[in-house]
Amino acid sequence: MIDAVAIDHLHKTFKNGKTMVRAVDGLTFTVPERTVYGFLGHNGAGKSTTIRMMLGLAAPTAGEVRLFGQPVTQAGSLLRKRVGGFVDSATFYPFLSGRANLEVLARTAGCFQPGRINALLERVGMAEYAERPVRGYSTGMKQRLGIAAALLNDPDLVILDEPTNGLDPSGIQAMRSLIRELADRDGKTVLLSSHLLHEVEQTCDHVAIVHRGKLVSAGAVNDLLAGGAQIKFAARPLDRAAALLAADYAVNHDETWLYVQAADDETPALLRRMLAAQIDVFQVMPHRLTLEEYFLNVVHNETNPMAETEVAYA
C-alpha cells in the first residue's frame, strides 16, 4: 500500500539577516492511508513550514515530500484533486458571506457543487451562519468554515493546521468527532497539527513529534504510550521512597504520587522493599502515560548539539 504522505530527509533553511534559520532539519516519516495522524511540536518546531512544503506552498532546501507516491514538485493536478487543507489558520474574504466564500473557492478549484456546499456547511455546524459576512465570524467559526473549504474537492488527504483554535469545549468535541468520521466513515487520511495533546490522544492513530526542526519520536499512539508504562504509589514519606528505588528504577514524584517505571509483575517486590524500609504505602495502581506526559518527556530528553552555533530555528 502506498502511504498518503512520505517525507524523506526534508530540510528547509533560509536567511534572516546574518543568521541561517533551520526550520526543518532532516525530517523523515510516513503517514499511512485512512488514518488520523498527529503532527506535534512546540511553537516554532517546524510544523507549519513542513505543512507548507506538503501543500506545495514552499520548496524544500533538500529532501522530498511525496503524496500518494508522487513528488509534490510534480503533483500539481494531484494537489488540486486529492488534497485539501489549510495552514496558519483559514483565511477568507471578510466582506463575503461564509457561503459566498465557499462558492468562490469551489469555482476557482473547478469543483463547484451547490449541494455539496450546503452539505458541508451542515456538517461543520455553519449552516445557521452561512449568509453572514465572514468579518463578523469568531475565530472558531472561521476554523469550522476552513474545514468546509478543505473538503470542497472531496479530497483523499486532508491537512489541517491547528483546526481547534478558537473553539469552545463543545466545538472541540464536535471537531474531534468530525475528524474521526473523515477517516473511519469516509476513508480519508487526515494529518493535523495541534497543541491540544489531550485531543490528539483521543483523535489520532499515529503521531510524529518534532523539536527544533528534527523528528524526535513517531509511531502508533498506543504503542508509544504503552512503552512508558509505570506503576504509581501513594507512599509516605515520598522523598525517601523515591531515593530508595532510584538506584534501580527510573522514578519521579509529585506531591501525591511516586511514579516508578517498572513492569506490573514487579509490584509485589516493590511493595515489600518499601515496607521493609518502614515506608507506608496507601495505594498502588498501574499508570499509563498520557500523550502530554510522553511529549514532554521526549522533548525534554532531546539534546541540542547546535546550541552554541549561529543556527536558529523557526
Image (tube, grey):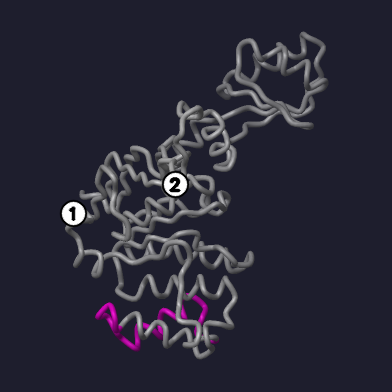
The percent coordinates of residue 167 (x first, y second) are: 59, 67
N-terminal-most mark, 1 or 2: 2
Q: CA distance from mark 1 to mark 2?
A: 35 Å
> Can you identify the residue that label 1 sits on?
70
Q: Name the residue: 67% across, 16% down.
A: 270
The percent coordinates of residue 297 (x first, y second) are: 56, 33
> Can you identify the residue that label 2 sits on?
17
Residue 46's tag is none
Task: Specify whether 97 is left or right of 77.
Answer: right
User: Please, what is the dominant secondary structure of the magenta stretch?
Assistant: helix
**Within 10 Å of the Cα at label 1, are there few (<14), some (14-19), or many (20+) other Cα atoms?**
some
Residue 116 sits inside the magenta stretch: yes
Q: Name the residue: 34% across, 88% down.
A: 114
Kindly indicate the quadrant of the structure image that contains residue 245.
top right
The percent coordinates of residue 279 (x first, y second) are: 80, 16
Q: Amino acid at mark 2?
A: Gly
Q: Is residue 234 above or below residue 93?
A: above
Q: Name the residue: 45% across, 59% down.
A: 161
Q: Is residue 140 above or below residue 205?
A: below
Q: Which residues are magenta?
A: 107-128
**Within 10 Å of the Cα at label 2, are there few (<14), some (14-19), or many (20+) other Cα atoms?**
few
Q: Is residue 275 above or below residue 155?
A: above
SS at circle 2: loop
Residue 1 sits inside the magenta stretch: no
Q: Name the residue: 30% across, 49% down.
A: 32
Kindly indicate the quadrant of the structure image that contains residue 80.
bottom left
Kindly indicate the quadrant of the structure image that contains residue 186.
bottom left
Q: Nearer the viewer, residue 305 or 187?
A: 305
